[in-house]
Each structure stands twice: as structure tokens, then as C-alpha cells.
Image (cartoon, rainbow, N blue to C red):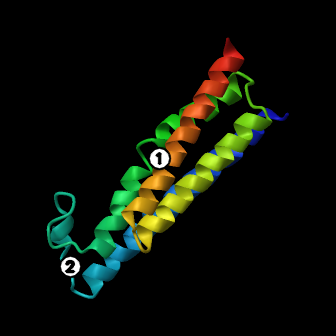
Amino acid sequence: MIQTTILLPVMTLMGWTFTVFLFITYQRFKGVLTRKLAVNDFKFGESANVPGAVSIPNRNFINLLEMPVLFYVVCLTAYVAQGTDSQVLALAWSYVSLRVIHSLIHLTYNKIVHRFAFYAASNIVLALIWVRLLLQLI
């Protein structure tokens, strides 16, 4: 298997993270331009004046910078250690898919039970990638 294939799910998740970042920017500018928000509402993060339509994308973005760090590390480790196989690649794509679905739920109808199910499933898949790579290395 070509080892660089593990970088495709990495690039996809990074692309999704940048997409959410652009959505935050859009929502913030929209709020300020329509005078529903003031620039100072973001001076120390987000004030209590910031509505959910603006704060939820920001929270989702933060979410995409937490656990996915471990995904990036395991994928880069698999690449460097020549540990990319079809199982690791399938798990990596599963992880990315679950994270995107989690984000879409969070950014749309935001039902916590559904969101949590996809978040938990993605973390299980992430743990499986680490276990798979560990077994390959030992």
C-alpha cells in the first residue's frame, strides 16, 4: 500500500476544519454587519450577547482542534513508521466521516443525543487506529 494514502483523510479533516472556520467568520461578520452584535462582543472570546448561531460554530471549531490532534499524530506516525495498511486507512476515513457528521449535526439541528453518538463513535475509531498501529509496531 502507498503510505501517502494516509495523508488524504488528514487533509480532508483539515479542509473540513478550515470550512468550519470560514463559517464562523461568516456568522460573526453577518452578526456585526446586521448590528445584532458589536465587535467588542468578541474582545474576550465571546460575550453573553453572542447568539447560538454564532457561538455554536465556534464551539464546533474548538471541538475540531481537540481530539483530532490525536488523529493527526497517529496518521503521521503511521506514515513515518510505514504502518499504513487497508485497515488503518479504512479506520482513518471512518474517523473523518464520523467527525464531519458530528459537525453537521452540531451546526444544524444540534440534537445532543445524536451528536454525542457520533462523537463517541469517532473516539472509539480513533482508539482502534492507535491500537492497530501499536500492534503493527510491536
Task: Name the residue carrying label 2.
Answer: 37
Task: Name the residue carrying label 1.
Answer: 120
Under tag 1, what secondary structure? helix
Q: Which residue extends farthest top?
A: 138
Q: Give the mark nearest the N terminus, 2 or 1.
A: 2
Residue 74 lies, in percent from the top left, at: 59, 31
Few, some or many C-alpha atoms within 10 Å of disc 2 (few <14, some 14-19, many ≥20)? some
Under tag 2, what secondary structure? loop
Contact between labelled residues 1 and 2, with CB atoms less than 8 Å apart: no
In the rendered image, the vertical position of residue 30 relative to residue 44, given as above or below: below
Residue 68 lies, in percent from the top left, at: 49, 43
Q: Residue 60 carries which label?
A: none
Q: Residue drawn 24% across and 75% down?
A: 51
Q: What residue type is labelled 1?
A: Ala
Q: Which amino acid does label 2 sit on?
A: Leu
- In the displayed structure image, the side of residue 40 where residue 30 appears, left or right: right
